[in-house]
Image (spheres, rainbow, N blue to C red):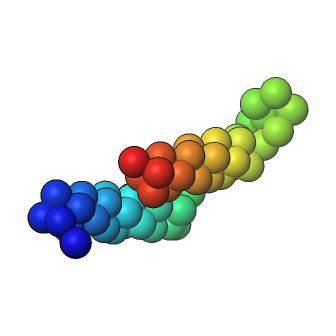
């Protein structure tokens, strides 16, 4: 394995680890409680809209990191 490939793999691993920590924070209680309100966004409860949006962004970031 070339040195550049090893550095690239280490960077990819570090980014995925940072994303996992960010995901843990975004999907944990204190932040979820902020969005647990009785409001609707386009007919969808705010908490569900937040979860869907963050989950979609999270999957897109993982795909981007893995493919780069």
Considering every residue shown, the one lying at the far right of the view is: 43
Between 40 and 16, the one lying in front of the other is 16
Counting from the top left corner in percent of width and height, residue 55 is at: 62, 52
Q: Quadrant of the N terminus?
A: bottom left
The structure residue drawn at horizontal position 47% and vertical position 51%, both measured from the top left corner, is 67
Q: Considering only vertical position in the picture, is 44 above or below 54? A: above
Counting from the top left corner in percent of width and height, residue 15 is at: 31, 58
Residue 58 seen in render: no
The structure residue drawn at horizontal position 31% and vertical position 60%, both measured from the top left corner, is 12
Q: Quarter-wise, where is residue 19 in the image?
A: bottom left
25 left or right, relative to 15: right
Considering every residue shown, the one lying at the far bottom of the view is: 1
Considering every residue shown, the one lying at the far left of the view is: 3
Considering every residue shown, the one lying at the far front of the view is: 1
The structure residue drawn at horizontal position 82% and vertical position 27%, both measured from the top left corner, is 42
Between 41 and 64, the one lying in front of the other is 64
The number of numbered discs placed on residues in the rendered structure image is: 0
Q: Quarter-wise, where is residue 24 in the image?
A: bottom left
Residue 24 seen in render: yes
Between 5 and 58, the one lying in front of the other is 5
Counting from the top left corner in percent of width and height, residue 6 is at: 20, 67
67 left or right, relative to 17: right
The structure residue drawn at horizontal position 23% and vertical position 62%, both measured from the top left corner, is 5
36 left or right, relative to 14: right
Counting from the top left corner in percent of width and height, residue 3 is at: 12, 64
């Amino acid at each position: 394995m070339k040195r550049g490939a090893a550095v690239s793999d280490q960077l990819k691993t570090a980014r995925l680890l940072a994303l996992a920590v960010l995901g843990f924070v975004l999907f944990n209680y204190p932040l979820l409680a902020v969005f647990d309100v009785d409001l609707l966004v386009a007919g969808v409860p705010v908490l569900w809209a937040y979860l869907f949006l963050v989950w979609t962004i999270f999957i897109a970031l993982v795909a981007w990191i893995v493919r780069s």
